[in-house]
Image (cartoon, coloured by chain):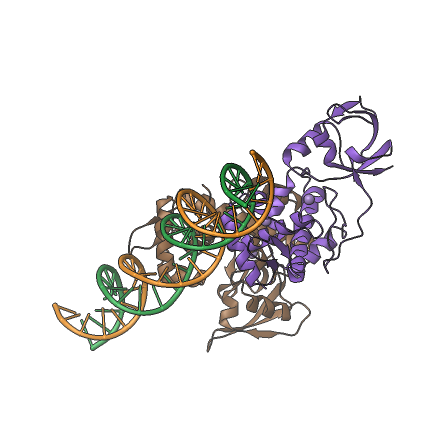
Chain colours: A brown, B purple, C orange, D green
Amino acid sequence: MNLSIAEENHIKSIYKLQEGDAVVTTNALAYELDTKPASVTDMAKKLKEKKLIEYEKYKGITLSADGRKAALQIVRRHRLWECFLVDKLSFSWEEVHELAEELEHVRSEKLTNRLSEFLGNPVIDPHGDPIPDANGKLAKPRPQTSLDQANAKRLVVTAVSDQSTALLAFLNAKGIKLGTQLEIVAHYEYDNSIEIKVKGQPAITISEQVAKNIMVRPV
Amino acid sequence: MNLSIAEENHIKSIYKLQEGDAVVTTNALAYELDTKPASVTDMAKKLKEKKLIEYEKYKGITLSADGRKAALQIVRRHRLWECFLVDKLSFSWEEVHELAEELEHVRSEKLTNRLSEFLGNPVIDPHGDPIPDANGKLAKPRPQTSLDQANAKRLVVTAVSDQSTALLAFLNAKGIKLGTQLEIVAHYEYDNSIEIKVKGQPAITISEQVAKNIMVRPV
DNA sequence: TTTATTATTTAGATTTGTCTAAATAATATT
DNA sequence: AATATTATTTAGACAAATCTAAATAATAAA
Ligand SMILES: [Mn+2]
Ligand SMILES: [Mn+2]
Ligand SMILES: [Mn+2]
Ligand SMILES: [Mn+2]
């Protein structure tokens, strides 16, 4: 199946929004892809025709088995290129998404697998997201929760779930990256903000929105 | 100036066919790009509009100063990616052109320059072609001639001018690559074939067509 | 259960890049 | 110079991907 760049971007976004097995709505997909709902409907028809999604008018979208397989290949390429950019070309984690968004569309299994090998077959990308292997299999997800729901006091950052430049730049400014150890000092019920302390730095208070997007596990 | 992939491919092919300052014909460009002359005419109008080429009906095409600058950037990216694929991912020289044809369209100066640095700022690509620097400047071309016109007896291969998979595979089979030293044993006037000897190998006879596409300099 | 609001789809248009077939211009041949 | 051949352009069409505005369906509120 030979997919266009537009088709690949749609498939990938459906995969992202699906999170398990929820149906993806036309509006959500349009927002994610920065297009209009009418355009999504058009594309949905085409992807259904190609049997990459299940779709009935007004009923939302889910990936078919073939669609999921395609999505995982695109995600694999995206995350491998992100690793390349960070590990080999010294880009920082907030710069790589945009470039990987283009590089992911070079469809060559040989290139993808050689790149993976060159990088030492990494299993997580610079944002803590798992990288599917050549067969599209994801490593078993390590147990992690968002910072706002963490029970333990001493935590280590495992991923960020919002990868906007804005959040990543904020985390840079606060000295927080993958692997950073932090300690929850207080939880303010008023606005659900959280006071945390990063090793060797003064304590800071972060908003609920930030806390929701930092993934952690007990140290 | 933001160019589409199609526009970039046209600009690059015009650059390739121009060789100095010759005008490029509609038919030649269509053949090079594997499209139809009518399509080239359409694109020529658009590129003229964007001031990237000089073009008058029935008079052929040449790059403008801006067009040449754009072409050199694309060529730079193409050749750097070829280096990456060969040097870092162990591809062989006949595999990389097709992939670079896609990778070259990721337009990021930062990426390009980081990649160049990562590769040690190479000045020639896997086919012996020069790589423009960040300012679009080409290294002074090393003196070289095609093998069929070489005077000296002992030669070293510096480039291949036809980069079709067919020729490169032929050269692989004969153990000829960049830097290979060879000696001209005989020249047969009947069909202009040439007998050559590669160090440590039995002599072989190659056709004029092959000889024309192997670039050499005296050892 | 009507009515209002929101979500989604349809209809029709636009842009980009391409094509075929026909017309015209340039060049080569008699 | 007239004619034949080749090269190029034009006219009109098409597919892909998108859009806006209008129509319709689903859902929420009254
Ligand atoms: Mn993309
Ligand atoms: Mn990522
Ligand atoms: Mn290309
Ligand atoms: Mn090359």
Instruction: Examine the image and state in which quarter residue B160 appears.
Output: top right
D11 displayed left or right of A211: left
Instruction: Examine the image and state in which quarter residue B168 appears.
Output: top right
Residue occupying the point 49% across, 66% down: A212
Residue occupying the point 57% across, 60% down: B48
Residue occupying the point 67% across, 33% down: B167
Q: In this rendering, does residue A219 appear at all?
A: no
x and y, in percent, of residue B190 in the image: 75, 23
Number of numbered labels in the structure image: 0
Nearer to the camera, D8 or B196: D8
x and y, in percent, of residue A197 in the image: 62, 70
Nearer to the camera, B9 or D23: B9
A22 displayed left or right of B53: left
B163 displayed left or right of A19: right
Looking at the figure, which quarter contains the N terminus of chain B?
Answer: bottom right
Q: In this rendering, does residue B146 appear at all?
A: yes
x and y, in percent, of residue A113 in the image: 60, 41
Extreme residue in the top direction: B202
Looking at the figure, which quarter contains the C terminus of chain B?
Answer: top right
